Image (cartoon, rainbow, N blue to C red):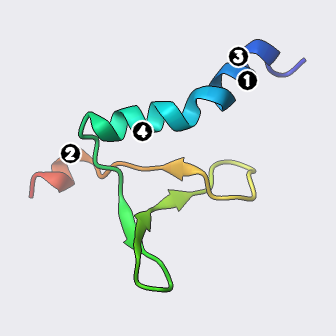
Amino acid sequence: MLCDKKTVEFVACNARYSVQWLINQGVLFDKELNWAGKEQYHLAKEGGHSHRHILFIMPMQQANK
């Protein structure tokens, strides 16, 4: 078995709440404008995935300029 089922279920069920908690704590995830000019979170792909689902945070040295 590649992944522990209970761990995968926990992460999948709690991811949205965990990200919202980070946002509420003041974490500034990178944002971009979509095709309609509306601001949205910048999502990227990781590894062999086919869909964008990774949130990024600008490195601190760039944020402090």
Which amino acid type corresponds to the residue marked 2 in the rendered image?
Met
Residue visible at 45% across and 62% down in the picture: 42
Nearest-to-viewer mark from 1 and 2: 1
Residue hosting label 3:
7
Residue 46 visible within the image: yes
> Does dot 1 land on a helix, a strand or a loop?
helix
Image vertical order of residue 9 relative to residue 56, above or below: above
Residue visible at 19% across and 55% down in the picture: 62
Q: Residue furthest right?
A: 1
Query: Pointer 1 and pointer 4: residues touching (CB < 8 Å)?
Result: no
Which mark sits nearer the N-terminus, 1 or 2? 1
Residue hosting label 1:
8
Question: How many angstroms separate mark 2 from mark 4 (CA)?
Answer: 21 Å
Which percent across, then down, holds residue 31?
37, 63
Nearest-to-viewer mark from 4 and 3: 4
Which mark sits nearer the N-terminus, 1 or 4? 1
On residue 60, the disc is: 2
Image vertical order of residue 53 relative to residue 41, above or below: above
Image vertical order of residue 19 relative to residue 7, above or below: below
Q: Categorize mark 4 by other alpha carbons within 10 Å: few (<14), some (14-19), many (20+).
A: few
Left or right: residue 5 compared with residue 8: right
Which amino acid type corresponds to the residue marked 4 in the rendered image?
Gln
On residue 20, the disc is: 4
